Image (cartoon, rainbow, N blue to C red):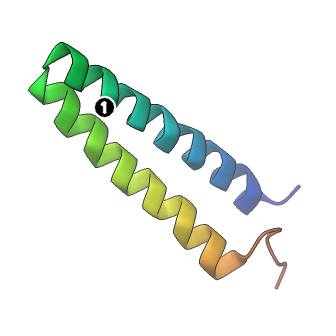
Amino acid sequence: MNTSIILMVIFGLVAILSVVGTVQGFKERNILSIVFNLASAVIFGGFTIATLVFQGYPATLH
């Protein structure tokens, strides 16, 4: 299995869990939780999208 696919899955899961954490932060009105969860959702979501765009799915071997 290609490492790009594994990284894409891991980064995608982290991004999804960060969004869940952001929603919980809003429910608890915890500003620090909202800031860090939003930042990690944007960063890891960006990594996931960039991997999809530049490597394709399934990832091309070249």
Q: Residue furthest right?
A: 1
Q: Is residue 42 above or below residue 26?
A: below
How far across and down, in percent of the image, does residue 12 sit? 58, 47
Q: Which residue is mark 1?
A: 22
30 horizontally vs 44: left or right: left
| Residue farthest toward the bottom in the current orientation of the protein | 62
Which residue is nearer to you in this view: 28 or 2?
A: 28
Secondary structure of the residue carrying tag 1 is helix
Residue in the image at 73% along x and 50% along y: 6
Mark 1 packing: few (<14 Cα in 10 Å), some, or many (20+)?
many
Q: Position of residue 25 (x, y in %)?
A: 24, 23
Horizontal and vertical percent for residue 43? Answer: 37, 55
Q: Looking at the picture, which amino acid does disc 1 mark? A: Thr
Q: Quadrant of residue 32?
A: top left
Name the residue located 56 percent from the left edge and 60 percent from the top edge: 48
**Residue lying furthest top in this view?**
28
> Is residue 56 placed above or below 41 in the rendered structure?
below
Residue 51: which quarter of the image? bottom right
Question: Which quadrant of the figure contains the N terminus?
Answer: bottom right
Left or right: where 61 falls relative to 53: right
Position of 41 with respect to 34 (left or right) is right
Q: Residue at x 54, y 66 (%)?
A: 49
User: In the image, is 14 to the left or to the right of 39?
Assistant: right
Task: Determine whether 1 is above or below 31 in the image.
Answer: below
Assign the C terminus to one quadrant of the image.
bottom right
Q: How many marks?
A: 1
* 33 vs 20, nearest the viewer: 20
